[in-house]
Image (cartoon, helix red, strand yellow):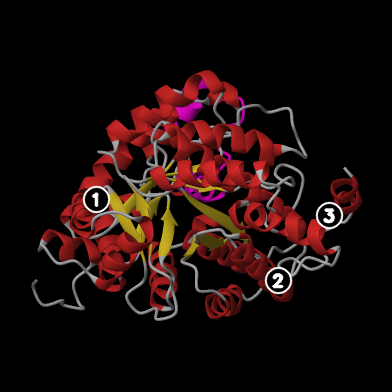
């Protein structure tokens, strides 16, 4: 085995036949051969989420042949929330079993929030630096057109330098792609915050998206810290009616080009996918994205399969997520019951993660993962034997069994999980 050069990125080490310590750890955890995993990292079909400056993070693999992963979004806003509340959500994210989290803060002192979250978690952390750049430009000048390319790249480098493991960058929102939205009369227009910021900036200035025009500058920053680029779907459909429209496809073609450029530069890249997709379109859209982006790991929000379930969008998302992951998606971003209604509270975060984990496990079973299938079999045997301890061990939500067996507040969630009502029923029946 060759010597490991710390300055090489994960994809560069893999291309040089080096099994990095992170790849070795992921292979052991995922029950896959380490050299096969190395080959997938080398090809770009798997990414390793770990900033090379961050010491306290659990390296996490996303992509072909691995378990479907779950991400949870948190973050402060100008309307409500605080660092204390977001840190409470971090605890729930870790205990409930998400694989990664994103800080989407747009409140005051974004840098402080990010640093506190980094210090509080061992999970890979993602951010959207454009949120900070755009917010601060609007706060200072009240005009998105005053935002400079230098400010955007300065915030990107700041996020990477402080230890962020992956960043969403809406590089595919080009002038041509935005024109497709205007030509084809979407129902919901542009629903991505980052995408809408860049579209408004391009319209006001007449310039091309800096993240696309100066993509090599972005690659240089990402390479320095081995930060994975999550190539954002700024033109994702905001309703089922818009799914698979020309704007979405045009952006995906651009993202496929950018994936190849990233791989050639020794930078890891994954692609973000659609938000709202009817059930009958999920297979074709997911498989089209995978082909157009050369099978880069695919990170999807949902997809939500119907638009009429406010308050229950964690369910509409789980339905779509299970299908999407069966047909090729690798990373599910959770959706909480508060989607389309407001900012999620701690219990909403927990419910969103559980729903996404159910979807991910269902897809792992459908995809033939032996350990997932065996876990279902063991749960069934435990039920047959009335073995409550084993049922708890194999359950996605172990808190339910804490309450059923002891009647005490859940040791994992405290007051956020209240299932005592089931205790008497199960003991008496």
Mark 3 vs 2, N-terminal side: 2
- Are there few (<14), some (14-19), or many (20+) residues within 10 Å of tag 2? some
x and y percentages locating residue 89 in the rendered image: 68, 66
x and y percentages locating residue 343 in the rendered image: 73, 54
Please state if 235 lies on the left or on the right of 259 as rendered. Answer: right
Q: Quadrant of the N terminus?
A: bottom left
The disc label shown at residue 88, or none = 2
Q: Residue reaching furthest front?
A: 385
Q: Is 85 covered by the magenta stretch? A: no
Q: Quadrant of the C terminus?
A: top right
Front residue of this view, candidates 34 and 40: 34
In the figure, 45 relative to 420: above or below? above
Front residue of this view, candidates 88 and 409: 409
Callout 1 secondary element? loop
Residue topped by disc 3: 419
Residue at 66% in and 46% down: 385
Distance of mark 1 from mark 2, alpha carbons?
Answer: 35 Å
Please state if 364 lies on the left or on the right of 258 as rendered. Answer: right
x and y percentages locating residue 171 in the rendered image: 37, 49
Camera-nearest label, 1 or 3 = 3
Callout 2 secondary element? helix
Residue at 72% in and 76% down: 84
Residue topped by disc 1: 44
Residue 376 visible at all: yes
């Amino acid at each position: 085995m060759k010597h490991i050069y710390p300055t090489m990125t994960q994809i560069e080490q893999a291309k040089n036949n080096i099994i990095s310590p992170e790849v070795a750890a992921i292979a052991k955890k995922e029950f896959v051969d380490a050299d096969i995993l190395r080959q997938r990292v080398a090809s770009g079909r798997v990414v390793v989420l770990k900033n090379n400056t961050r010491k306290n993070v659990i390296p996490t693999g996303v992509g072909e042949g691995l378990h479907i992963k779950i991400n949870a979004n948190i973050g402060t806003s100008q309307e409500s929330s605080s660092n204390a509340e977001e840190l409470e959500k971090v605890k729930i994210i870790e205990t409930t079993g998400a694989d990664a989290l994103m800080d989407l803060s747009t409140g005051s002192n974004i840098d402080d929030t990010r640093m506190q979250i980094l210090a509080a978690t061992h999970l890979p952390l993602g951010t959207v630096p454009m949120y900070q750049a755009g917010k601060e430009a609007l706060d200072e000048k009240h005009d998105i057109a005053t935002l400079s390319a230098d400010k955007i790249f300065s915030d990107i480098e700041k996020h990477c330098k402080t230890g962020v493991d992956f960043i969403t960058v809406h590089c595919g929102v080009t002038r041509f792609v935005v024109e497709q939205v205007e030509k084809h009369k979407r129902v919901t227009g542009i629903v991505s915050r980052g995408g809408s910021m860049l579209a408004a900036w391009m319209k006001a200035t007449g310039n091309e998206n800096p993240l696309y025009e100066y993509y090599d500058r972005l690659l240089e920053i990402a390479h320095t810290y081995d930060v994975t680029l999550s190539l954002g779907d700024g033109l994702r459909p905001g309703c089922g009616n818009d799914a698979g429209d020309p704007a979405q496809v045009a952006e995906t073609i651009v993202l496929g080009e950018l994936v190849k450029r990233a791989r050639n530069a020794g930078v890891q890249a994954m692609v973000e996918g659609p938000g709202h997709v009817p059930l009958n379109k999920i297979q074709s859209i997911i498989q089209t994205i995978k082909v157009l982006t050369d099978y880069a790991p695919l990170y999807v929000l949902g997809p939500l399969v119907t638009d009429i379930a406010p308050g229950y969008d964690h369910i509409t998302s789980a339905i779509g997520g299970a299908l999407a992951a069966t047909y090729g998606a690798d990373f599910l971003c959770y959706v909480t019951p508060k989607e389309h209604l407001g900012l999620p509270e701690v219990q909403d975060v927990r419910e969103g993660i559980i729903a996404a984990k159910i979807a991910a496990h269902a897809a792992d079973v459908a995809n033939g993962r032996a350990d997932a299938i065996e876990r279902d079999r063991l749960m069934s045997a435990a039920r047959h034997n009335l073995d409550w301890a084993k049922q708890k061990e194999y359950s996605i939500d172990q808190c339910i069994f804490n309450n059923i067996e002891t009647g005490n507040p859940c040791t994992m969630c405290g007051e956020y999980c209240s299932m005592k009502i089931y205790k008497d029923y199960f003991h008496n029946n």
